[in-house]
Amino acid sequence: MACQGCPLWGLTEDEDVRAMLRGSRLCKIRSRTWQKERLYRLQEDGLTVWFQRRIPHAPSQHIFFVQHIEAVREGHQSEGLRRFGGAFAPARCLTIAFKGRRKNLDLAAPTAEEAQRWVRGLAKLRARLEAMSQRERLDHWIHSYLHRADSNQDSKMSFKEIKSLLRMVNVDMNDMYAYRLFKECDHSDNERLEGTEIEEFLRRLLKRPELEEIFRRYSGEDRVLSAPELLEFLEDQGEDGATLAHAQQLIQTYELNETAKQHELMTLDGFMMYLLSPEGDALNPAHTCMFQDMDQPLSHYFISSSHNTYLTDSQIGGLSSTEAYVRAFAQGCRCVELDCWEGPGGEPVIYHGHTLTSKILFRDVVQAVRDHAFTLSPYPVILSLENHCGLEQQAVMACHLRTILGDMLVTQALDSQNPEELPSPEVMPQSLSQLKGRVLVKGKKLPAARNEDGRILSDREEEEEEEEEEERVEAAEQKRQAKQISPELSALAVYCCATRLRTLRPAPGPPQPYQVSSLSERKAKKLIREAGNSFVRHNTRQLTRVYPSGLRMNSANYSPQEMWNSGCQLVALNFQTPGYEMDLNAGRFLVNGQCGYILKPACLRQPDTNFDPESPGPPRTTLTIQVLTAQQLPKLNAEKPSSIVDPLVRVEIYGVPMDCARKETNYVLNNGFNPHWGQTLQFQLRAPELVLVRFVVEDYDTTSPNDFVGQFTLPLNSLKQGYRHIHLLSKDGASLSPATIFVHIRVQHSRGPD
């Protein structure tokens, strides 16, 4: 049974891939004492790797997906291998890091060559998977289920096996209808489908009536689209700069039939290929690369920020790990937190003070910053130091920062920098100095203000002065804390000087753009509510960092949207905790090359702006979304064939308070394969430039809360109009390909933004 669109296409003769198909006995390393040899083998689908477990689990617990791999590292390039892999030569070791919360897989191969086969093979498979079109992914997806449903592996499908296939792909089809479809394809009339009969059955199963209807509307009687007819469709879609030449180029790119292509015609298959491609995506492909002005002051950008970055779980008993920093950087984070405490042997450690969280060395974190901070984005990284160390270990911290980071570290103001504003993330005008690829330290600066009893305030004391639940802890900490900050560490706070926010009124004298205030979510909300426009104006000049309340012991998050509405740049979240809050963060920083910097709207950048998120003015934009269909939604219980989803789609709007809304469709009973809704949801928006749109699919349940199926979040300004596919993501942000929602989008502006 041929596997159409298989990632192994073109790689079946590759020696590395063939070795992976045969399998390897690799040593899995968890600790100094837990090091077990296990068989790992690439499956024939080219998408999954099967691995042995001591105790057999459900089949889905014995595989991992190639598309869920974040990175493959050679040698001792993970915290686990650096600590526990000493018995194995680095050349024999590799680390597979996954997207989301799945732990790293640290492995040692019997030989260096076998380790290299897996490193090279996985790289080739990931590159092939990345290059696959959505249609190829769909073909492969259905054929992989077909292979599983063929219970006796005879490449023939009985009706019983076809029914099993239908349940696997999340559709509960009426027996009479399913049998009729089966018999229409059974041309040999032997109660078995094989070869071309199977392909015909799959074509019928994968038919998209809603796409055929749109295609017929523009193609007319001849059932093919000429370039002028395709141009008409593009113009109705609202495609910017649609031309006949562009229509001709789309035919050459997406049409599968060579004869049609030669005559500049597009068939239904080509039309479907186009609508499933990035050019038919709801996300504007022009916004996926760098497209914003990067020459403005740092205060004019939203900057992806993490809270207590070292934690992998809860705030009171979780594991601290340098891998948490690596993962944050892999998600585009540009501001990470280092909670620094006195450690044994004169070495500062990082952990959540006064809790049971484990400790890691400060220098190991700085090395992780050096090695991983700029793998995804070249733009500056801010190290937010929460300093609880005495003078000696502060000096050690400064020494580690200088020696490990070297020229990466910003230690003095850049040439030609205007002292009245922050530098830009990009190259400075008329200067070779730049912040790209550089690290900024946020910390206390001498001379520091003393409070009434003459003590120097710690960073966290400044931040949480109003947090009643932590006042006692901070007071006790102050008694044994150093009485001043070390000059060595102070010297490294160049552009991010931690300062308590005493007033929103600009101080007399020259501007102080280098001062950064840290606010708890509670204090930030109070300022938003009571100060409104004054807080917005403050954030046009200076950086403000917001962090979760100390009461969030389980590492829950707050909604970042409220803080963005007021122009707060460093809205720090617990990156280890999935949920709608992290979906919003991923959606906000999805565009502009995922570089971690997003230019704020003009109303949040102008120093004399009158914008107040609590009073945004009248509605000026109408967003209309027609939810048409969904395709190939994932099963929530892969081990239970009869479990089929009852999907509904909810569209959620996040923006200023008066814009926030959510509306949903009805649910469709027992069909996750190709449910149809055809329902229209409409929203009135007052500040569209701040809006994020979140598409959510849930499995309806009458007796308990609905189960999450998938979601996709993006800025309204990056949402394309017309007929579009939305490619769903899991809770952890991994692709659920080929799962999509098909929608029609219309955005009407009554007047332009201020």
Image (spheres, rainbow, N blue to C red):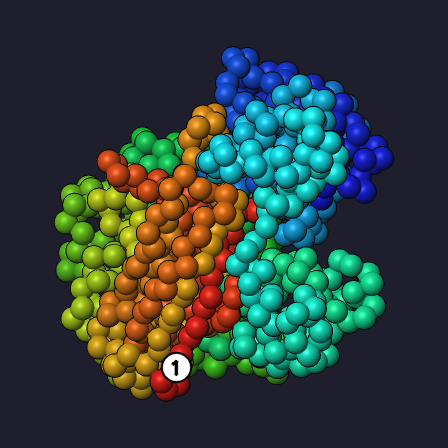
* Front residue of this view, candidates 62 and 297: 62
List the single residue furthest toward the top: 55
Which sits in the foreground, 642 or 584? Answer: 642
> Residue at horizontal 79%, vertical 66%?
261
Please say whether residue 313 is visible from this viewpoint.
yes
Q: Quadrant where the C terminus lies?
A: bottom left
For residue 519, side relative to residue 137 (left or right): left
Measured from the top left, where is residue 608 in percent x and y? Answer: 31, 86
- Foreground pick, 576 / 342: 576
Q: Quadrant of residue 490?
A: bottom left
Q: Which residue occupies 81% across, 35% down?
A: 12
Q: Amino acid at mark 1?
A: His
Pointer 1 residue = 749
Q: Give coordinates of residue 743: x percent, y percent.
A: 47, 61
In this view of the protein, which residue sits in the foreground, 59 or 444? Answer: 59
Identify the residue shown where x is 45% and y is 68%: 745
Residue 1 place in picture, x, y as percent: 74, 31
Query: Considering only vertical position in the picture, is 488 above or below 347?
Result: below
Please indicate whether residue 84 sits to the left or right of residue 230 in the image.
left
Would you place residue 259 above or below residue 152 in this image? below
Element at badge 1?
strand
Q: In this rendering, would 650 be left or right of 736? A: left
Q: Position of residue 94 (x, y in %)?
A: 66, 32
Residue 205's place in the image compared with 464, above or below, is: above
Q: Is residue 96 visible?
A: no
**Number of residue marks:** 1
Q: Residue at x 50, y 43 (%)?
A: 673
Query: Circle 1: is it few (<14), some (14-19), or many (20+) Cα within 10 Å?
Result: few
